[in-house]
Amino acid sequence: QVQLVESGGGLVQAGDSLRLSCAASGFTFSRYAMGWFRQAPGKERDFVAVIRENGVSAYYSDTVKGRFTISRDNAKNTVYLQMMRLKPEDTAVYYCAATGLTGSFYLGQQWYDYWGQGIQVTVSS
């Protein structure tokens, strides 16, 4: 069955870096765009970043642009989110997700077919 398993979360201090990983299985990873979303306490789940199937192009939310980098390794069926200069407002549960839609960047949750269970990232001030 389809699985997306996030790892790498934890508690860090403001200004630190952290890398999240998401290991995929049960579908043809290289044919899916992969996204990261996050949900802060008491807020809705928001788009963070998305990377196209071939890993060549990516798109970021304004709040993380320049600090976060999404990448993927299709040989390992894994997508990454490198987070730098973390801020307390980056505290959230982070989810990876997969969409089979191609041809554009899809930012809305409704376009994603598969989701991970989420992983906590906490940034202390």
Image (spheres, grey):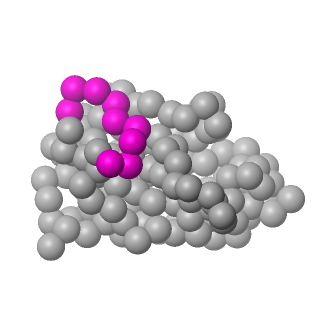
Res. 33 in view: yes
Q: Quadrant of residue 117?
A: bottom left
Relative to 9, is 86 on the left or the right? right
Relative to 57, is 82 on the left or the right? right
Is residue 1 magenta-colored? no
Is residue 106 magenta-colored? yes
Dividing the image into 4 quarters, which one contains the N terminus? bottom left
**Residue at 62% over, 38% down:** 64
Number of numbered discs: 0
Image coordinates for residue 100, horizontal then vertical, percent: 19, 44
Q: Quadrant of residue 91?
A: bottom right
| 42, 97: nearer the viewer | 42
Res. 75 in view: no
- Looking at the rendering, the stretch of residues picked out in magenta corresponds to 102-110
Relative to 22, is 3 on the left or the right? left
Relative to 49, is 17 on the left or the right? right
| 65, 114: nearer the viewer | 114
**Residue at 28% over, 27% down:** 104
| 52, 47: nearer the viewer | 47
Above or below residue 3? Residue 15 is: above
Image coordinates for residue 84, horizontal then vertical, percent: 66, 45
**Residue at 30% over, 35% down:** 52
**Residue at 74% over, 61% down:** 123
Image coordinates for residue 75, horizontal then vertical, percent: 22, 51
Prevailing secondary structure of the magenta residues:
loop
Above or below residue 58? Residue 7 is: below
Image coordinates for residue 120, horizontal then vertical, percent: 58, 69
